[in-house]
Image: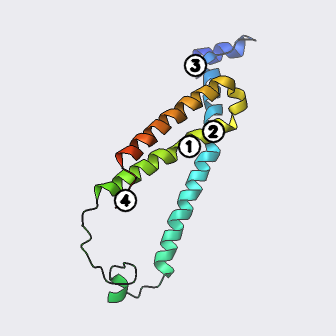
Amino acid sequence: MRSFPAAVAETRPGFHDPSTQLNAERTEVLAEYLPTLLFLIVATGIGIALIVVGNFLGPKRFDSEKLSPYECGFNAFEDARMRFDVRYYLIAILFIVFDLEIAFVYPWALVFRELGVFGLIEMGVFLGLLLIGFIYVWKKGALEWE
């Protein structure tokens, strides 16, 4: 037995059921994601298949030399849990901060003509703040490695 709106839609020409139109739109939107879903399924399948095939066909000759920790071809001379100097982390953080500058400058350069003078001023403010931060870090001696 058909629902009431479907029966009315069949008997009255020009009548469109909103629920069927909404379902059709949802189906179209979901259909657009189908290639992405298929890509993810195939990529996952290939990854799992390669791991399984490698485990079945790969060599399994274990010895003490192969299972020992490797560190640059010679035995470890210190404990693996040694403390690092704080400056190491400071340099790493500063590298990330100044490296992220490129992540903002490159897209800006691509659309520079569309942004006009306003975009130029905004990027000038951004680079100015970065320069002030760089000068501050330099004056504090954070970039000196002893």
What numbered label is drawn on residue 10?
Answer: none
Residue at the image point whose x is 59% and y is 39% from the top:
105
Instruction: Kindly identify which residue carries mark 3.
Output: 3
**Crowd around label 4: few <14 · some 14–19 · many ≥20 (10 Å):** few
Q: Secondary structure at mark 4?
A: loop
C-alpha separation, residue under disc 4 versus residue under disc 3: 78 Å
Amino acid type of the residue that numbered disc 4 sits on in the rendered structure: Trp
Instruction: Kindly identify which residue carries mark 2.
Output: 107
- Place residue 86 in its image quadrant: bottom left
What numbered label is drawn on residue 145?
Answer: 4
- Place residue 133 in its image quadrant: top left
Amino acid type of the residue that numbered disc 2 sits on in the rendered structure: Pro
C-alpha separation, residue under disc 1 versus residue under disc 2: 7 Å
Mark 2 vs mark 4: which is more N-terminal? 2
- Check whether the beta carbons of the residues at disc 3 and disc 2 lie within 8 A of each other: no
- Check whether the beta carbons of the residues at disc 1 and disc 2 lie within 8 A of each other: yes
Using the image, determine if residue 83 lies above or below residue 36.
below
Q: Secondary structure at mark 3?
A: loop
**Crowd around label 2: few <14 · some 14–19 · many ≥20 (10 Å):** few
Using the image, determine if residue 1 lies above or below residue 110.
above
Amino acid type of the residue that numbered disc 1 sits on in the rendered structure: Ala
User: Could you tell whether 81 is left or right of 59 in the image?
Assistant: left
Front residue of 89 and 70 = 89
Using the image, determine if residue 107 lies above or below residue 7.
below
Using the image, determine if residue 106 lies above or below residue 1.
below
